[in-house]
Image (spheres, rainbow, N blue to C red):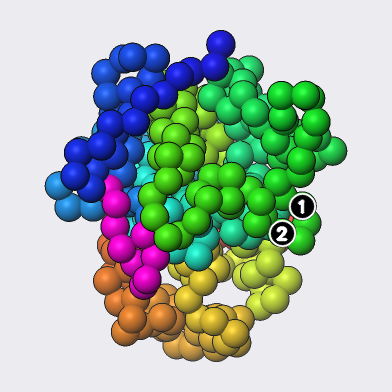
């Protein structure tokens, strides 16, 4: 049965009650570059701490659960992290999956969620049809919300405008927060998507610059650069130049500095804390890391 949500607002803070149960924090109304939206990893946030712990997922994902962890440190590590104030319109999860990219991580993640047995309890008006997310109306008609070229309708479904915080925006966020809080399967879908994304980064890096035999610490920085998008149009030339340098790790970590100095330092510390990043190496043939 579909859950019923009630919005509770206190100043700029939005909470929601599911089925008249205890209220849980969804996000705070924040301005950003002329836009208005929600954020819940903010100072004084009452967001539940549901932190990604790679040790809980290594049985299923092996070293890949560790490999994605440094980037999750840079993104807040919280399965429930949300923002809806920038051009992505809706970003969610410990990996900050963004809804504006056709076929991107958020789209693939939501498609996977909608395949879970309890999906209709959370998103009763969404279905997967012909491999894409559709909204279903009362008469049984459907509308594709995303395709290979656009996610504009999906973005509008989740967050109608960037002018103000709307009820639809709060409820969409509440559904994902509630679902992820109570369902281990929903949490695993986040991990699975993050792993799939980082595997694709390694495949691309192998094709573009050749990383066979490279240590996992170097590969992890490359993956974070691609995930974060720093480097711009010069990303691959900069990565290639860094790998050929005398100190490739330092060179890779310098990409995006100074604007992203704090992120790069956080990434460095998280990588250094795990000795496996020095002992594991990328194997191009198996498309996996080996000792």
Which residue is denoted by mark 2 in the rendering?
A: 150
For the point 58% across and 51% down, which residue is it?
156
Using the image as rendered, state which of residue 163 and residue 228 is in the foreground. 163
**Residue 65, placed above or below residue 212:** above
**Residue 202, placed above or below residue 113:** below
For the point 36% across and 72% down, which residue is it?
33
What secondary structure prevails in the magenta region? Answer: strand
Which residue is denoted by mark 1 in the rendering?
A: 147
Say if mark 2 contacts mark 1, CB within 8 Å: yes
**Residue 134, placed above or below residue 85:** above
Using the image as rendered, state which of residue 256 and residue 123 is in the foreground. 123
Q: Is residue 45 visible?
A: no
Magenta segment boundaries in residue numbering: 28-36
Using the image as rendered, state which of residue 184 and residue 158 is in the foreground. 158
* Position of residue 107 measured from the top left corner of the image (x, y, whole percent): 64, 47
Q: Would you call the spot at circle 2 few (<14 residues within 10 Å), some (14-19), or many (20 or more)?
A: some
Q: CA distance from mark 2 to mark 1?
A: 6 Å
Q: Would you call the spot at circle 1 few (<14 residues within 10 Å), some (14-19), or many (20 or more)?
A: some
Magenta span contains residue 146: no
For the point 50% across and 49% down, which residue is it?
159
For the point 70% across and 36% down, which residue is it?
135
Judge from the rendering whether residue 44 lies leftward or rightward of residue 47; answer left or right: left
> Which quarter of the rendering shows the N terminus?
top right
């Amino acid at each position: 049965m579909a859950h019923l949500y009630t919005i509770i607002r206190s100043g700029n803070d939005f909470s929601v009650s599911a089925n008249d149960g205890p209220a849980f924090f969804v996000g705070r109304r924040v301005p950003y570059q002329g836009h208005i939206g929600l954020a819940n990893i903010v100072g004084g946030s009452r967001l539940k701490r549901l932190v990604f712990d790679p040790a809980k997922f290594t049985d299923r994902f092996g070293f890949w659960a560790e490999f994605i962890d440094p980037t999750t440190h840079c993104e807040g590590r919280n399965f429930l992290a949300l923002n809806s104030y920038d051009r992505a319109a809706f970003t969610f999860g410990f990996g900050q999956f963004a809804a504006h990219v056709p076929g991107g991580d958020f789209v693939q993640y939501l498609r996977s969620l909608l395949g879970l047995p309890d999906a209709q309890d959370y998103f009763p008006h969404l279905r997967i049809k012909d491999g894409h997310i559709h909204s279903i109306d009362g008469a049984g008609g459907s509308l594709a919300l995303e395709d290979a070229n656009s996610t504009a309708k999906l973005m509008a479904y989740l967050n109608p405008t960037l002018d103000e915080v709307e009820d639809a925006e709060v409820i969409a966020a509440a559904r994902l927060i509630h679902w992820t809080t109570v369902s281990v399967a929903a949490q695993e879908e986040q991990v699975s998507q993050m792993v799939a994304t980082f595997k694709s980064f390694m495949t691309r890096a192998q094709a573009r610059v050749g990383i066979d035999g490279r240590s996992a610490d170097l590969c992890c920085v490359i993956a974070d650069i691609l995930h974060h998008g720093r480097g711009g149009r010069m990303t691959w030339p900069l990565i290639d130049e860094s790998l050929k340098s005398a100190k490739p790790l330092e060179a890779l970590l310098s990409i995006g500095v100074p604007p992203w100095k704090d992120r790069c330092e956080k990434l460095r510390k998280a990588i250094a804390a795990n000795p496996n990043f020095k002992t594991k190496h990328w194997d191009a043939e198996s498309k996996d890391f080996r000792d």
